[in-house]
Amino acid sequence: MGDAAEITAHVRSLRRYALQLTRSRDAADDLVQECLARALANASTLKPGLPVRPWLFRILHNLHVSEQRKLRLRRATLLDPAEERVPASQDERLELRAVLDAVARLPDDQRSVLHLVAVEGMSYQEASRILEIPIGTLMSRLARGRETLRRSLQQPRAARLQVVGGCDAR
Amino acid sequence: MPDEPTETDLHRWLDGELGPADAARVEAFLAADEPTRARLAEYARNDQLLRSAFATEDEPEPSHAIDDLGRRLSARLGRGRGRPVASLLAASLTAFVAGAASYPFLEAQLSWRVPPVVEAAVRAHDVLEATSRVEVPASARAELIERLERHLGADVFVPDLAVVGFRLVGGRLLVADEGAHAQIVYEDDQGSRLSVYLAGVSTIEEGEITLVEVEDLTAGYWQGGTLAYSVIADIDPEILRQVAIEVSAAAENGPEG
């Protein structure tokens, strides 16, 4: 019983992460499905004493990376998770859209780190195990990702001011 | 002016990755540095927005295929997974064993997969309960030890567990993919069996004794040098804990007379 609830929770997390990686609901669910099939086939390789979540995330992440290599040029239809949340006010929706667009422009490696730490609330250790990178690398990607995100969310306002100023000068 | 923390420390602070002393140092710095404080607040706010964007209320139901795979996976993983006995028990165990490493109890509160060697030990105990057969009886103790040592390629001793109410019945060798395993069998006054299972593999974290419930049995396992030890019985975890301590202490002190 506990196990079933645990896996259900992991599946939800995996779907969020897959959506972050693929930006398409269909592609995300394909990825999760493939991940679970792999996990099932390799259940006996789960190392003793290790929790299930990082293992599942690592399978999903590696599948995504290898698919990216194959389909580098084919981009699925963009899907904004914010659009699925009806109750947000117009301002909130704009803000959520802005942050998602900004995150989408981050390099893949920074986006993955930011999602695992900020959205999934994982420890640095867990996230570094999933991504198979040293904690130092993870921390520098996280710092760069957050800073890039911060700057790009400030830019639109600055750009708008410039345009307005230009109009006025003419 | 407090020491300026590194950029990394600022993020670690934001993510709760710093210990209390380092966190206090960062907070003292932030209290005096408005621009950095504002920048961190922006990071935190953007993280929050990102979480909101992924809030799951309106997440579409997973497909039938995903549901089905998830169910099968949880059934598959559930079979080999043990449920931790109260963590306090484990805490007193690790405190007792010298050199006990930090262990996964706190992290994995639900359950985790027991090492394959422990699964093998549980199966061997089940078989023993069904057949009640040992190859070498307690009366041939020296022969038992010699035989197990020859096949396992390591020093083996057969601890005296009278102090915890168990007497030696005998032992047997089992064949596994990576070589021989040994099962030493004890019994208490009520005829309840207990197995001490030895395998020449290093699949368990060094220095740590873990207590779990596997199906109807209680198991304790740890790595001692080149051997992985499991103690299995259908008994109260507290008694099994004492047995595990007895066996591991005897193993550390070397063969007794």
Image (cartoon, helix red, strand yellow):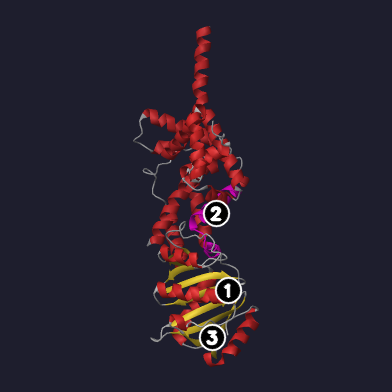
Asked whether B202 falls inside the magenta stretch, the response is no
Residue A114 in view, yes or no: no
Q: Which of the numbered marks, if any, corresponds to residue B252?
A: 1
- Cα–Cα span, label 2 and label 3: 42 Å
* Residue B159 shown left or right of residue A94 in the figure: right
* Residue B201 shown left or right of residue B35 in the figure: right
Label 3 resides on the chain identified as: B
Q: Are marks 1 and 3 in contact (CB under 8 Å)?
A: no
The one nearer the camera, B61 or A50, is: A50
* Residue depth check, mark 1 versus mark 2: number of the one nearer the observer: 1
Q: Of the residues shown, which amino acid type is indicated by label 1?
A: Glu
- Cα–Cα span, label 1 and label 3: 21 Å
Q: Are marks 1 and 2 in contact (CB under 8 Å)?
A: no
Label 2 resides on the chain identified as: A
What residue appears at the point 54 percent right and 33 percent down from the top-left corner? B2
> Residue B223: where, in percent of width, then height?
56, 69
Q: Which of the numbered marks, if any, corresponds to residue A59?
A: 2
Q: Of the residues shown, which amino acid type is indicated by label 2?
A: Ile
* Residue depth check, mark 2 versus mark 3: number of the one nearer the observer: 3
- Cα–Cα span, label 1 and label 2: 39 Å
Residue B184 in view, yes or no: yes
Q: Measured along the vertical axis of the image, is residue A92 above or below residue A5?
A: above
* Secondary structure at numbered mark 3: strand
Q: Which of the numbered marks, if any, corresponds to residue B171?
A: 3
Q: Of the residues shown, which amino acid type is indicated by label 3?
A: Gly
Q: Are marks 1 and 2 on the same chain?
A: no
> Residue B70: where, in percent of width, then height?
44, 58
Give the magenta-colored segment's residue range.
Answer: A41-67
What residue appears at the point 48 percent right and 82 percent down from the top-left corner? B161
The one nearer the camera, A77 or A133, is: A133
> Residue B150: where, in percent of width, then height?
65, 83
